[in-house]
Structure formats: C-alpha cells, structure tokens
Amino acid sequence: MAAASSSDYDGCGAESNEANSKWLDAHYDPMANVHTFSACLALADLHGDGEYKLVVGDLGPGGQQPRLKVLKGPLVMTESPLPALPAAAATFLMEQHEPRTPALALASGPCVYVYKNLRPYFKFSLPQLPPNPLEQDLWNQAKEDRIDPLTLKEMLESIRETAEEPLSVQSLRFLQLELSEMEAFVNQHKSNSIKRQTVITTMTTLKKNLADEDAVSCLVLGTENKELLVLDPEAFTILAKMSLPSVPVFLEVSGQFDVEFRLAAACRNGNIYILRRDSKHPKYCIELSAQPVGLIRVHKVLVVGSTQDSLHGFTHKGKKLWTVQMPAAILTMNLLEQHSRGLQAVMAGLANGEVRIYRDKALLNVIHTPDAVTSLCFGRYGREDNTLIMTTRGGGLIIKILKRTAVFVEGGSEVGPPPAQAMKLNVPRKTRLYVDQTLREREAGTAMHRAFQTDLYLLRLRAARAYLQALESSLSPVSATAREPLKLHAVVQGLGPTFKLTLHLQNTSTARPVLGLLVCCLYNEALYSLPRAFFKVPLLVPGLNYPLETFVESLSNKGISDIIKVLVLREGQSAPLLSAHVNMPGSEGLAAA
C-alpha cells in the first residue's frame, strides 16, 4: 500500500517533508475496515517469539458485527467474532512460569474473555445483581396472565422513570417493541427468571506485587453499576471492590496492589475520583467544567482531555497545574513513551485531522493525517520499538515509525516573534491628570532631570559616608581588613527570661590561623545580666565555624527589650575588629507571669 501524503510539524513551526520529518510512513490503508478506539488497541508479544502483534477490538462498520482482530505488520493474522461490542483490550502476565507469554483480556458486555496463545482460556462474568422487586412482581403477574401486555408496558415505564435501579435486559427489550409484537414476546419470555446484569465500561491493568515491566498484573474493571473490581490474575476472583458516585469511563492506575496503589477514574458526571489502597470510596475528587474525553497519567500528572477542546493537567490531589487549548475537538488520547530517551508525552487526536504530542503544556510535534484519527497506540510493533498506530474515522489504518535520530524539542525554538506580541494591549484612556503631568514634563523637563540627579548624588554620598563610618568603627559583622579575615554571626534562642546567646565566629582566610582574640558584650545592666560578658576566643582554624555560647537573663518584668552589642577585639588594641548588634526579643516568660 502506498505511503500516506501526510505532513509533519515540529516545534520550529513549519511543515516539512519526508526528508526532515521525525516519522517514517510505514503503511497507510484507507480501506482497512478497522473501526475502534484507543482503549481497544493493545500491543504484545503473544507467542513469545519477539514479534509484537497488534490486538484490535473491532466494533465493525456502524457498530455491527464486532470482531477480535490480530494484526501482524499490515495484515490481519486472525479474526474471530465477538458476542457484544468490545469495551477495552489489555495484555498482562498471569503467572511467573516459563515461557512468560502474556495473556490477552478483552472486555465485552458483562464478560472478560481471556486468551492465551490466541486461544480461549477463561471467561469471567460479572456477578449478577438482584432484580427490582416491583419488576419481578409484574413479570410474575404476566406469567399468571393477570395483566395484559399494554398494562405491563405502562407499569414498566413507570418503574424505569422512578426507580434508582435500572431494569433488566428483558424488560428493556420489551419496552422497545411495537404493540403487535408485545404479546408474542410476553408468551415467549414470561416463564424466564428476571436477571439483571451489569456491563463493563472500562478496563486496565495493575501490577500485583512488583513494579517490573514483566511482573504479574491484575485486571481492574469499571462497571455500569458504578463499581471498580480488581481481579486475581490466576484464579480470576474479586480481590477488591470499590464504589463510585458515577459510572467510570476512563481508568489510570499506578503502584502495586499488594503494596500501595493509586487509582484515578474519570466518570460520566464530569468528575475524576482518586482512590487508594484499602479505600472503599474516593479519597479526592477533581471537578471538571466539561465531560472528559480521555485520561492519561504522565509521571505524577493526570492529563485530562475535555469536550471544551482543551487539555488540563492535575496533581493526584486535584490541584490544576496547567491548561492548553486545542484548535479542534479532541477525539482520542493515549500515552507516548519512548524508553530509550526517557520521554513520556500525551498524544491527542483532533477532529481536524491532526495528532498533537504534548509534554506537559509544551507542544512537541504535530502529525497531519488524511482523515480524523479515532484511536492511537504507541509502542513496539513487529521488531520496531517506537511505532505509532492510528485508525481513522473511515476505517483506515496508518502505521508510522519514529526515526532513531528523532529528538522532540519543545517549542522554544520557534521562528519569528512570540504570539503575545501580536496581542493588543488594553491601554486605559488618557485622564486630565495624565495630560497635565505630560505638559509639565515637557515644560520643565530639564529642571526635573537636574533635581533628580542632585538627589541621586546626595543618596550616593550618604551611603558612602555610612559605609566609611561602619568600617572605621568596625560596625560590620564581617572584617574589612585582610590581616584579620573574620565573620561573626549571632543567634538568640529561648522564650525568656533566660536566653541562650550563641556567637558563631569563623576565620575566612585560606591558610593562616588567628590567635589572641577577645569577645566583649555591651548591654544595659538594668535590663540584662550576663555571667560571661568578656571572654577569650580559642585559636581559630581557617574554614571552621566556632560556636561561643553564653546566657542572658532578662531582669525587666515589663517585657522591654534592648540591643546587646557584641565586639570582637584584638589583645592590646582599643578599636574592635568587628561588631554585631543583637536585637533581643521580649521575654515571654515574664510577660506571661
């Protein structure tokens, strides 16, 4: 099949041809007759021969004749009919025994069909739900010919409108019939027992007890009955059951079932619920402003696509991180994970025929397709590690291979001015005050500039005088002389009335130690008492921090505080080498007394 004439767009902003595109056009068949969505696509080495196949839960044209298809390369290898429309497909390891070939799970209706080596292995059915007592009573009356079909229809419609529990499949089929067909249907089914069966809406996999890529996984099912079920991978028994306020449609899980896991479920009520291990009900709730159309987890960020043509990034606690607006409606989403470069990104198929790839809110790549893409799948296919598989709205199949030299670059290298430069600023209207100030600046501009320069020179002069005074009186906590390179830092601890004063003294020279220093504390004797107000400093080795501790006792019971001056002196000199002013806190102990 000829390659598609699709163009590729990268962060540089221009469309490019096949020569400098990041993708190789491997296959395009517009008549492949593949009708599915992203949840029903899976890639796996089903036979353990290193050749990865594509598993497709095909809806069939117009939702008729659903089938399970397995593709090898561009060709359909096997094809088998399904009893109901598929809801999701997943591959997982059931056991640790060799050979470790993955099993295929396909959710369809109320059942999960498990295949091994593409042969039916196990069928798991959801447990039946108790029927509505009123509905059961009506069919019992119909069985005994106490009510006619028309009365049965009216009563069932009343139950459907008022009851919280949905009707059984038998009653729903009966309500769809014409008046002439009702009596035959009642005679045929009135002896059957009423069974209410829920269906599977979504499915994913969760690691059992190890985080390895080839570890055993459990199946996680979302049902129409607003429940989440976790199945044992070997016995297919229900390990855990969780309730949700609404019907789940998208699932994302992380962690291991036996250790700790986090589960995010996007539901039909427009909310995303976060559940953790041992929680029967949601722990967090993310309220969306529109219905979700996709849910992907990228590292620790939940990326949600909505019907408002936008992508949103949330944390697992519900905090919104970013929002990106799309040029068209989002039809499907999936994860792009390039293991060789450690890249995880989100792929979004749009209604205008584009497939956009985002890392967070940065656009990495845009792929143009001949038709709107309805499903996406990225991974190892055949023997190629990075293969992108797309199906289109008309049933076409597109296969692209990422070049080994391709590097996704964020849109920082865009050519031309940024888009914000073209936006018009909301400039306020000119007021009378603004006009008067403008006229004043025009008339007295020279005098205003001279006054500004005079004030600036005075400010610089005062700053220089203050700096000189600090150097001459050693008011700085850092020594300004090269002979005595010292640094002083004071810390006060305590609530009062007794405080602990710690002086951190450091020799900042590279090789010369300092000896013969004294520390003196000057304070108001009416407010404070120091047992050690004057003491010698030991030898200061270069680079080490020496904490010198003393205690200060507050004598005032009025909560008055003052400054204690700490001076570092050289023996035989009256001028201090450096000083620090310690602002003492108020004594909370005396104030409370």
Image: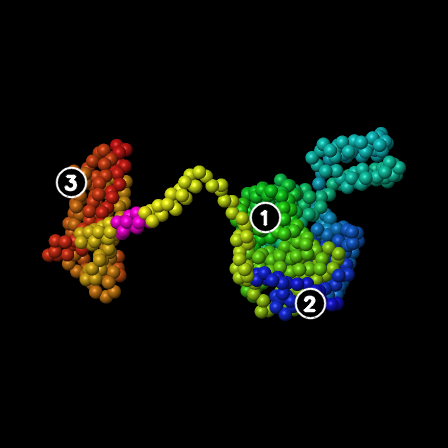
* Eye-nearest disc, 3 or 1: 3
Amino acid at dot 3: Glu
Q: Which mark is residue 476?
A: none
- Element type at marker 3? loop
Q: Main secondary structure of the magenta part?
A: helix
* Eye-nearest disc, 3 or 2: 2
Residue in front for this viewpoint, 226 or 586: 586
Disc 3/disc 2 C-alpha distance (Å): 89 Å
- Where residue 481 appears, as percent x and y from the top left, is 20, 60
Determine crowd level at label 2: few under 14, some 14-19, many 20+ residues with C-alpha closer than 10 A. some
Amino acid at dot 2: Ala
Residue in front for this viewpoint, 460 or 315: 460
Instruction: Place residue 378 in its image quadrant.
Output: bottom right
Earlier in the chain: of badge 2 and badge 1, it is: 2
Q: Which mark is residue 525?
A: 3
Disc 3/disc 1 C-alpha distance (Å): 66 Å
- Is residue 562 shown left or right of residue 442? left
- Where residue 532 appears, as percent x and y from the top left, is 17, 47
**Mark 2 — residue?**
26
- Is residue 105 shown left or right of residue 187? left
- Where residue 521 appears, as percent x and y from the top left, is 17, 47
Earlier in the chain: of badge 3 and badge 1, it is: 1
- Element type at marker 2? strand
The answer to the question of whether label 3 and label 2 lie on touching residues, with beta carbons closer than 8 A, is no
**Mark 1 — residue?**
264
Q: What colouring does the structure picture have?
A: rainbow
Q: Name which residue lies at 47% across and 41% down.
A: 430
Is the residue 371 above or below the residue 440 in the image? below
